[in-house]
Image (spheres, rainbow, N blue to C red):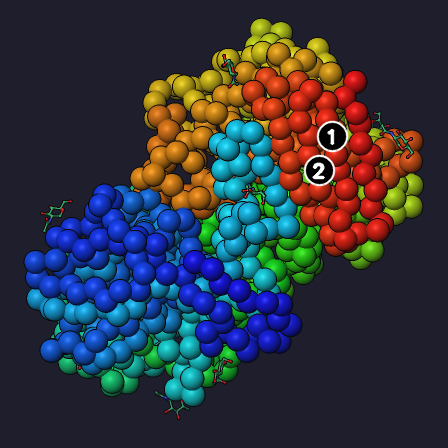
Amino acid sequence: MCYSKGSLSLAAIALALTSVVGADYVPVLYAVGGNATEEGLTAYTGQSITLDSTSPVLTLDYSAEVLGFPYIEVEAPGSEVQVALKFSEPYGGLSMPYGDGPYLFVDGLADGFRTVTFNFTTQDRIEAFVAQGGFRWQSIVLLSDGPLTITGVGLRPLVEIKDSSDLTGNFTASNSLFDQIWSLGARVVQAACYEAGTLAPTWQITDQGALIPGQFPAVSALGGGWSDYTLTFSTKITQGGTGWRVAGGIMGGYGPYFVLTASEADLGSDGALSLERNSLVAGYGFSFVNQILLSSATPTTFPVDMPIHVGEWHTITTAINSTGYLVSIDGTEVAFVESSGYQGYVNGGWGSNSLTSGTFGFGPWLNQEAYVTNVTVTGSDGTMLYENDMTSNDTLGEYSIDTNSYNVCLDGAKRDRSVWIGDFVHTARILATSTGGYDMVKGMIEFEFANQVSEGDGDGIVPISAYAGSKPEYRNNGAVWPGALGEADYQFLFLLVLGDYFAQTSDVDGLKAHWSEIDRLVTKTIGRWLDPVSGLLANSEASWFLAQGQQNATAPTALLAASFTKLSQVAMVIGDTDKATTYASYASNFSTAINSQLWSDSLGTYSNSLSDASTGSLNAISFTIIAGIADADKATKSIQSLDNFLVIIGYKDLTSQASSSSTQLSPNTQGFLLDALFLAHINLGVSADIVLPAIDTMLNKFWSGMVNQNEYYTGTSWEYMLADGSPWAFPFDSLGHPWGGAPTYVLSNYILGVRSEWNETTSSFQWVFDPAWEIAEGLNLTQASGRMPLSSGGYIEASWSLPNTMSSQVVDNDQVQVLTRPRS
Ligand SMILES: *[C@@H]1O[C@H](CO)[C@@H](O)[C@H](O)[C@H]1NC(C)=O
Ligand SMILES: *[C@@H]1O[C@H](CO)[C@@H](O)[C@H](O)[C@H]1NC(C)=O
Ligand SMILES: *[C@@H]1O[C@H](CO)[C@@H](O)[C@H](O)[C@H]1NC(C)=O
Ligand SMILES: *[C@@H]1O[C@H](CO)[C@@H](O)[C@H](O)[C@H]1NC(C)=O
Ligand SMILES: *[C@@H]1O[C@H](CO)[C@@H](O)[C@H](O)[C@H]1NC(C)=O
Ligand SMILES: *[C@@H]1O[C@H](CO)[C@@H](O)[C@H](O)[C@H]1NC(C)=O
Ligand SMILES: *[C@@H]1O[C@H](CO)[C@@H](O)[C@H](O)[C@H]1NC(C)=O
Ligand SMILES: *[C@@H]1O[C@H](CO)[C@@H](O)[C@H](O)[C@H]1NC(C)=O
Ligand SMILES: *[C@@H]1O[C@H](CO)[C@@H](O)[C@H](O)[C@H]1NC(C)=O
Ligand SMILES: *[C@@H]1O[C@H](CO)[C@@H](O)[C@H](O)[C@H]1NC(C)=O
């Protein structure tokens, strides 16, 4: 599992894409038998393993989240032998037909399928062209009698993942559970963040056109506004079939999906859907299969009269009209796919708003592969809208599947693999405290501003869920706006990222360079969403993530107040006193508006919103404390009201949600709460007795569940957990989600006690060493030590032990000083 890449220049990284860099990830444990197994695995040390009819299944355990290009090396089999590879984060995904997938929201520069078949006829090494996103478990299932002798198996890494003990940042305390919880965040940011130029395109551009292996279709950034058009392209199947979309969503392609299969035998699979030969298969949704939340219309199969062969070119035309899609091959009509049955699946959030409008794209089904060239789109009046022979590598950018041009962090290592900017608040702080990945944070800021909408109704808005391969030239084409309205407060979470980044780096030049872009974003959002009557955020066009969609809600408004307070500090350091005053004034007005309208004596905390006054909100508690809106009295009462949110092991988002063992609990929102509890103690003087029960519950009952359940363990933090401790929505839940990793920075900032604080007197940030002694004692810790990476190089090393011994030093950095606050 060790792999070293050294430091390469950007150009060198781009060149290195096609060659092996460093050592591979190899499994740690394996077992051979009639079925996948979680028990009785033994050490894998590269020995040859033979699969045969009595022992057809190889189970592989990589021990923690890894990702990259899967490969297998074999001795020459007697005859053709196929094996199905399956991948999963939790063990249970190995008994599902598609592994723990398919995860089909976007292309994500990784395989949307979690299974793939390799076909061996000679001594060979086969490596998948498309990378697998994060997983811990793999199986290899023999699809015929065999035997097949495997001489090597593993992954060519997509990214280097170091053990937590090898990072610049470090945390260790007298309770090793906390070290393991700290490591969840340290690992997950490595699995979900990628330096510029490290993600590989999922198509190959050749002089015959694009060669596209089976995968989630990637869509053109150009077709979002087109409707009632005819798509024509030439295609040559090299394995199984060819696939395409029309009238699909600009952010992922959700919509109609078509696959044409060849008459030749397909590759096998372990129970996955197999398509009829020489047929057209049509469906609607993300895919042909339902995967928990991702509903798809049952696919319809249309036999095709003319022979379709591997290796032959055919021209396919798909004409959209108001009742369906007419598919012709080489000028002959082969099927009219009626759209009336799809009406119930139209979803303006995921796809386009209608059955006849939206973009087009390409992506064959599982285990298939085909060339695509000579693509044209003509409007209903015969106008030529689009022509592309798909032989230029520029095409990759247009379909958002070129290598990432910026450092980017995705929301999850396996799913959604989108740049969800709201999730990044936690990610950025974890990066700072663990890997010291400040360049990653800076890259994300560059990425967001490069893709900021620059004209029209959405001018100033930044993307909330961009593709990793997004190219700024397409930022005004509908992928950013109006979709950003779906979670309008993600704009403010991005502003918070900017403030946090500045607190940790004091990077004046970095933020000055974006000062006018920040102002455009602020002007846009305030102008549009500040309600003049309530003084809160409200506009029926917008929905609010932190308030479950509610208007005039506490949490989104408090979040914006927190962001403005931080931006006001940036403005002060930059020397823009006008902005410093304005931002502070907004923050103060939001504080007044919230305290005068949203405090509820009967709840003992803030209401979720004006119209949902009888519901308590976890995010309202967290963000009123983070923003300094709650005073000591209100903060104390709010924290005491947490009992009304407790469901067995953790805290639900709203008091109005039902409590049961299957209540969904969010590590994202509880991460904000964890931060807020320490801030209440440190900034407002709320006593340790008041904050300890919730801190204890979250660390020792909630996050401990990500560490001590082997069947789900990935060494990385999760997207959601149910109140019984199991992952939410198996097998859909992402068990490699940075938004779930807040304890990493919370433990470093408050238990180790090294953090950057605003100093009112000097109007600047300073590093302090100031552990929350009473909380640490309440958690039964006697000692902690660790390292805090610095953006200007080097790190702060610190340690303490009870009752009051402290020592610290700054290593490899002569600019930074640390203010040690002795225990009083
Ligand atoms: C493998 O497990 C499945 C259920 O998980 C069972 O149906 C099947 O019979 C098992 N196969 C073998 C060879 O044991
Ligand atoms: C921090 O460093 C110490 C000393 O090298 C090590 O024992 C510990 O495991 C590290 N902490 C983590 C979370 O890896
Ligand atoms: C596209 O780029 C890849 C990777 O650099 C290269 O191998 C391929 O030849 C290029 N294709 C064309 C048609 O230029
Ligand atoms: C497996 O590979 C062999 C050798 O390339 C080929 O002849 C055979 O058609 C392939 N099988 C399938 C099902 O594609
Ligand atoms: C759509 O096209 C089909 C196939 O050509 C045709 O039968 C149908 O009448 C058309 N619908 C409309 C509303 O024109
Ligand atoms: C693509 O179009 C070009 C130009 O018209 C033509 O020469 C070529 O044969 C076409 N390719 C296919 C596979 O039809
Ligand atoms: C927000 O509250 C104000 C004051 O009660 C009200 O006038 C306004 O309509 C509300 N906005 C929305 C979108 O509900
Ligand atoms: C805050 O409220 C005061 C009093 O209503 C008003 O004068 C001021 O302009 C507001 N601040 C901002 C930035 O709008
Ligand atoms: C703020 O900085 C000054 C000057 O370095 C220092 O004396 C003071 O203690 C700092 N204030 C706090 C609250 O740390
Ligand atoms: C700390 O230790 C005491 C005594 O063993 C125990 O009663 C208490 O539950 C522990 N507290 C925590 C937060 O682990």
Q: Residue at x 35, y 20 (%)?
A: 660
- Image quarter of residue 627: top right
Q: Residue at x 84, y 51 (%)?
A: 814
Q: Where on the image, by quarter, is ligand 9?
A: top right
Where is 72 relative to 808, above or below?
below
Q: Nearer the viewer, residue 223 or 604?
A: 604
The reply to whether discs 1 and 2 touch (Cβ–Cβ < 8 Å) is: yes
Apparent side of residue 194 relative to residue 240 in the rendered image (left or right): right
Q: Give percent across and percent down for residue 329.
A: 25, 78
Apparent side of residue 743 relative to residue 26 in the rendered image (left or right): right
Quadrant in the picture for the N terminus: bottom left
Q: Residue at x 64, y 36 (%)?
A: 785
- Image quarter of residue 765: top right
Q: Give percent across and percent down for residue 213.
A: 34, 71
**Callout 2, which amino acid?**
Ala
Can residue 226 be spotted in the picture? no
Q: Nearer the viewer, residue 501 or 434?
A: 434
Q: Earlier in the sequence, mark 1 or mark 2?
A: 2
Q: Which residue is mark 1?
A: 806
Q: Give percent across and percent down for residue 319.
A: 34, 69
**Callout 1, which amino acid?**
Met
Q: Quick one: label 1, few (<14), some, or many (20+) residues within 10 Å? A: many
Quadrant in the picture for the C terminus: top right
Q: Nearer the viewer, residue 819 or 410?
A: 819
How far, Cα to Cα, is label 1 from label 2? 8 Å
Where is 67 relative to 176, above or below?
below
Q: Which residue is mark 2?
A: 798
Apparent side of residue 608 relative to residue 581 in the rendered image (left or right): left
- Image quarter of residue 722: top left
Where is 533 relative to 82, above or below?
above
> Ligand 2 closer than 8 Å to the CB at disc 2?
no
Mark 1 element type:
strand
